[in-house]
Image (tube, rainbow, N blue to C red):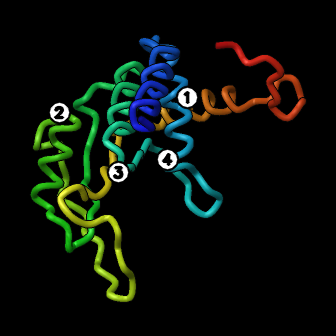
């Protein structure tokens, strides 16, 4: 009964969102990048868009975002980042299917050495590592993402971001 109730809550929440407009995809993608993308730091300047995540849904959202932002799929390069104990070939195939990219766009996988002192929980058939998406010639896109993110996260009212009556 609990599972049915939870499923209904998810269905109801999905119906509240509905289909996303291109503007909403830009907003969601900019926020996703700000959370998971590479950003400049004083000790490490960043001049290109690099996004890495292990969640296929978030990878698909970011790919939609790049489409809406006008980035050709041919400007993307992918790298599977995975522990050396993982199934590298299966992970490559998994991410190829998620992205629907050309195999030629995939770089040599980045293997993380196993530390025997740690007990990893992300193992088994469901472990596909992370996918790194690099965007060629993307310094202008990075500046746009910075601007979009600043606008999204701005506090125009000065009240700490409180919303009295959130619209549905």
Badge nearest the viewer, 2 or 3: 3
The image shows residue 70, relative to residue 115, as above or below, that is above
The mark found on residue 54 in the picture is 3
The mark found on residue 75 in the picture is none
Q: Nearer the viewer, residue 114 or 109?
A: 114
Confirm or deny contact between disc 2 and disc 4 (CB under 8 A): no
Q: Nearer the viewer, residue 165 or 130?
A: 165
Mark 4 lies on a secondary structure that is helix
> At 38% from the left edge and 88% from the top edge, which residue is drawn?
117
> At 68% from the left edge and 32% from the top edge, which residue is drawn?
150
Which image quadrant for residue 14? top left
Q: Earlier in the sequence, mark 1 or mark 3?
A: 3
The span from disc 2 to disc 1 (Cα, nearest Å) is 26 Å
Q: For this view, does 46 lie left or right of residue 94?
A: right
Q: Dot 4: within a 10 Å radius of its alpha carbon, few (fewer than 14), some, or many (20 or more) residues?
A: some
The span from disc 1 to disc 3 (Cα, nearest Å) is 24 Å
The span from disc 1 to disc 4 (Cα, nearest Å) is 16 Å
| Residue that carries the numbered disc 1 in the rendered image | 144
Q: Earlier in the sequence, mark 4 or mark 3?
A: 4
Mark 2 lies on a secondary structure that is loop
| Residue that carries the numbered disc 2 in the rendered image | 100
The span from disc 2 to disc 3 (Cα, nearest Å) is 16 Å
Q: Earlier in the sequence, mark 2 or mark 3?
A: 3
Badge nearest the viewer, 4 or 3: 3
Q: Dot 2: within a 10 Å radius of its alpha carbon, few (fewer than 14), some, or many (20 or more) residues?
A: few
Confirm or deny contact between disc 1 and disc 4 (CB under 8 A): no
Q: Earlier in the sequence, mark 2 or mark 1?
A: 2
The span from disc 4 to disc 3 (Cα, nearest Å) is 10 Å
């Amino acid at each position: 009964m609990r599972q049915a109730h939870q499923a209904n809550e998810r269905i109801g929440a999905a119906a509240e969102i509905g289909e996303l407009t291109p503007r909403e995809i830009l907003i969601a993608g900019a926020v996703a990048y700000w959370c998971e993308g590479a950003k400049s730091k004083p000790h490490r300047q960043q001049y290109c868009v690099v996004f890495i995540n292990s969640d296929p849904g978030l990878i698909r959202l970011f790919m939609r975002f790049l489409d809406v932002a006008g980035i050709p799929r041919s400007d993307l390069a992918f790298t599977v980042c995975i522990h050396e104990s993982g199934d590298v070939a299966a992970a490559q195939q998994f991410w190829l299917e998620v992205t629907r990219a050309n195999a030629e766009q995939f770089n040599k996988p980045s293997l993380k050495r196993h530390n025997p002192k740690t007990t990893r929980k992300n193992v088994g058939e469901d472990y596909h590592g992370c996918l790194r998406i690099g965007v060629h010639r993307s310094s202008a896109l990075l500046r746009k993402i910075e601007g979009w993110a600043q606008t999204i996260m701005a506090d125009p009212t000065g009240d700490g971001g409180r919303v009295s009556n959130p619209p549905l």
